[in-house]
Amino acid sequence: MNTSNRLRNKLIRKIQQLSTNKLSEINKLLSKIENQLKSKENTLKLGGSWKNFDDKIFKDFTVNLHNNRAKDRHVD
């Protein structure tokens, strides 16, 4: 049996011994971890989006970002 299967089986045995309250806590924790991973994956998907940007556009999005936002917020 490989390491992954051994760890999975060990976790299953531990989970089977938990009370209902603890199972709820574990479930919440696992959901939180899953959401964090999904968020990270979605953020990383954007990384390749920048590679084909024109240099001027990229500069506007990065270097000039704060100035552009300040201009957008300026109310006469």
Image (cartoon, helix red, strand yellow):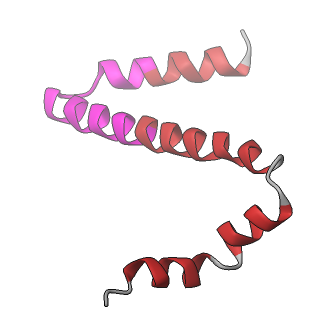
Which residue, as the protein is rendered here, is positioned at the far front? 76
Q: Is residue 65 above or below residue 24?
A: below
Q: Residue at x 41, y 39 (%)?
A: 35
Nearest to the observer: residue 70 or residue 39: 70
Q: Position of residue 56 (x, y in %)?
A: 80, 67
> Is residue 28 shown in magenta?
yes
Q: Position of residue 41 (x, y in %)?
A: 59, 39
**Residue 56 falls left or right of residue 67:** right
Q: Which residue is drawn at 39% across and 25% down?
A: 14
Nearest to the observer: residue 54 or residue 28: 54
Q: In this view, does 26 lie above or below 36?
A: above
Quarter of the figure with residue 34: top left
Q: Is residue 29 above or below residue 27?
A: below
Q: Where is residue 71 in the image (x, y as percent from the top left)?
A: 48, 83
Q: Residue at x 76, y 71 (%)?
A: 59
Nearest to the observer: residue 3 or residue 62: 62
Quarter of the figure with residue 7: top right
Q: Where is residue 48 in the image (x, y as percent from the top left)?
A: 76, 43
**Residue 42 falls left or right of residue 31:** right
Question: Overall secondary structure of the magenta stretch?
Answer: helix
**Magenta span covers which residues?**
12-33
Which residue, as the protein is rendered here, is positioned at the far left? 21
Q: In which quarter of the image is the C terminus?
A: bottom left
Q: Residue at x 71, y 78 (%)?
A: 63
Q: Is residue 72 above or below residue 10?
A: below
Quarter of the figure with residue 22: top left
